[in-house]
Image (tube, helix red, strand yellow):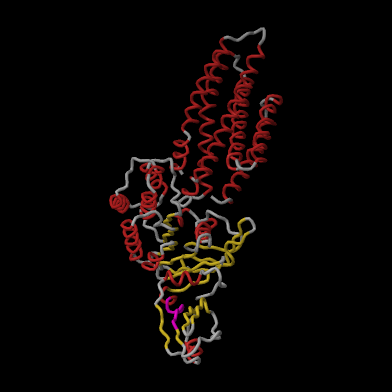
Amino acid sequence: MLALIKREIQDHIVYFIGAIVASALLVVVLVEEVFNYDSRNPAVGTTSLGVVLSGIVALGICGMGAAQMYMDKTRRISAFISTLAVSRSRILLARIVAGIVVILILLVPLAVTASILVRIFTPPIPLYSDMIFEIFTATFLLALGGYSIGLQTGWNSSAVTPTLGGLGLTCIFVPLVVVKGFGPEIMVILALFIGASLLRTWHKFSSTSL
Amino acid sequence: MNDSVIQVENLVKYYDGRCVLDGIDLAVPRGCIYGLLGRNGAGKTTIIRILLGLEPATRGRTLLLDADSASLPAKTRSRIGCVAEGHNLIQNYKVGRLITLCKDLSLQWSDDSFNHLIQTFRLPTDRRVRDLSMGMRAQLNLSLAMAIDPELLILDDPTLGLDTVARRQFLELAIEVIQKQGRTILFCSHILSDVERIADRIGILAAGKLVVDCPLEQLKDRVKKMRVIFPEAAPANLYLTEIVNQQTQGREMVITVANWNKQKQTILETFMPSSCTEIPMSLEDIFIECTRPSTEPLQVA
């Protein structure tokens, strides 16, 4: 399993480097936003940061999922690997783990920075730490949702409907988070969507010809 | 536990409404080198892909080492070596990286055996797979398959692209594998002289059916080609069943008959031919006769 995860990371190293760079940039933006906080117009900066963050994370991760599956299909990687002592489920699981690692590389430094800043600049009440947890859990789920759409889109790249459907769903989910905010409801919706989407991807991946 | 390493039961496969495999039944016993033959598009690669779980079957059941090939567990896979048609290795990898990947993913790997093969074939490890020649890719694929000391070796046209020397080396390797007790090889090739040299059982696919499935010696014994000369003009009908091919010229008739037996010989003798000589047939001759498109597929088993 570790060998499979290592292979996914090596094959898609550009996404890992991209996640590190994006994470560093977002940390800088966040710190600058906090230090240049404008008390007369507080909402604009935070909202724009949230939208930019959600958009980058969801689309970037969606792209990674699509690239992983598309490369696999065109280069017939799984067709070769699955003749070794590996099952298709493990190949997909390793791929998903690699995707989750990219999301975590992107979000964890940001979450840690945000937590530190909240401790420094806000009163010590649980409201703020809960808010940080909710925002980052929802962003993680949003990214994972985007990733699972990407996996499906990449595998079904020859079919128009799933490709457009995947892009459409991404376009629905990002505004949904912006409108609905980061709360338990959106987490439940996203978790259900991710479960269904990954199940569908697993079914397609393990039953079609390689 | 079944003694058949490969079992295929009523296998049917349709591609876009076209029947490629039509109820194939096949059992390959342990320790056998099975040569699966057929013309282009006969379904050899499809059978192998279904066996390896790369392709779903439309109907039927396939078992490899007693495990359902649609869901082969990793442990069973680790006992199977495979050389696929076209050598679909990961093209953008360097050879060294591909070797490391295969080694990491295998449950049993023999460095000694692999290094011996790499040195025999003089394969470079610093080049990308896509930069290797077809022959070198075949050698790499074969080396990777052999490094796990497989109990079952599945070879889909493995000598494609190999030069004569490399082909000979490959055949010797295959013989080396079979000499280890209990090893089985399923072998598809268009080079029938190779198959004839190493296979001890033959299957021939034609029109989606397995028309021949028997030991090589038995096949040679059962399909007979004869030159018969009659005292007068050759009769129009010999009343023999399973005539694969018949050519008549004056008193001379050349016939190929499947499932030759004493009864057929007696029928032929009733026409009192002046002479009846058997024309020796190679596997290639038999293959051509059995897959002749103008004739109905014959069952030789």
Regarding residue B79, the answer to whether it shows in the image is no
B18 to the left or right of B42:
right
B110 to the left or right of A168:
left
As drawn, which residue projects farthest toward the right? A179
| Relative image position of residue B278 (x, y in whole percent) | 41, 82
Viewer-side residue, B13 vs A131:
B13
Where residue B220 sits, quadrant-wise, is bottom left
- Disc tally is 0
Q: Establish if B243 lies above or below A60.
A: below
Viewer-side residue, A160 vs A128:
A160
B76 to the left or right of B175:
right
Regarding residue B66, the answer to whether it shows in the image is yes
Q: Establish if A101 lies above or below B46.
A: above
| Relative image position of residue B185 (x, y in whole percent) | 41, 63
Decide whether residue A153 is among the magenta residues: no
| Relative image position of residue B45 (x, y in whole percent) | 50, 58
Where residue B22 sits, quadrant-wise, is bottom right
| Relative image position of residue B180 (x, y in whole percent) | 33, 64
Tell me what residue is drawn at x 42 percent, y 47 percent. B105
Q: What range of the chain is rendered magenta?
A: B220-227
Viewer-side residue, A115 vs B240:
B240
Q: Establish if A205 lies above or below A49.
A: below
Tell me what residue is drawn at x 61 percent, y 48 percent. A203
